[in-house]
Image: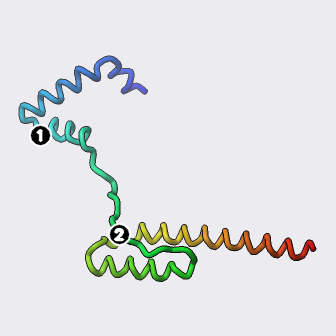
Amino acid sequence: MAVEALLDGEAEAITRKAIELAKGGDLTALRLCLDRIASPRKDRPVLFELPPITSPANAAQASAALVAAVVAGDLTPSEASEVGKLIEAYVKALEATDFAERLTQLERMTNR
């Protein structure tokens, strides 16, 4: 809040000065301006065709496809790991949905 108070009303002038310095060859100012224009990405979209996962049994095929993509160099190990976490979460959701449906069916059968 203190920094915001100090900069209040000065942002445009400071930005203009940074741009002028960058245009003049100041590498620090140039880096600052470029970071604001195109900030570094923390990650990127993973372009990878994953086999459909309609049941927990399909997770093994999807995981095998991830491993194959890493071996082929199409995905990095960390990208595959992140996609693997999504597969795991999706499978858990499928299992929870299946469990809830089966429980509902059992309750209906016992209430007859």
Q: Report how far apart the C-alphas of labels 2 and 1 lie in the structure.
A: 37 Å
Name the kind of residue labelled 2 in the image. Answer: Phe
Color scheme of the displayed model: rainbow
Residue 82: image quadrant is bottom left
* Residue in the foreground of this view, choosing between 32 and 75: 75
As drawn, the residue found furthest toward the right would be: 112
Circle nearer the N terminus (2, 1):
1
Q: Which residue is mark 2?
A: 48
> Circle 1 sits in a helix, a strand or a loop, which is it?
helix
Residue 19: image quadrant is top left
* Residue in the foreground of this view, choosing between 112 and 83: 112
* Residue in the foreground of this view, choosing between 81 and 74: 74
Cβ–Cβ below 8 Å for labels 2 and 1? Answer: no
Residue 62 position, x and y percent, is 45, 77
72 up-or-down from 49: above or below: below
Residue occupying image coordinates x 35% and y 69%: 48
Residue 49 position, x and y percent, is 37, 71
Residue occupying image coordinates x 27% and y 79%: 72
> Circle 2 sits in a helix, a strand or a loop, which is it?
loop
Residue occupying image coordinates x 90% and y 76%: 110
Where is the N terminus found, in terms of image quarters? Answer: top left
Q: Which residue is mark 1?
A: 27
Badge 1 local density, few (<14 within 10 Å), some, or many (20+)? few
Name the kind of residue labelled 1 in the image. Answer: Leu
As drawn, the residue found furthest toward the left would be: 24
Residue occupying image coordinates x 85% and y 71%: 108
Label tally: 2
Badge 2 local density, few (<14 within 10 Å), some, or many (20+)? few
Residue 34 position, x and y percent, is 20, 40
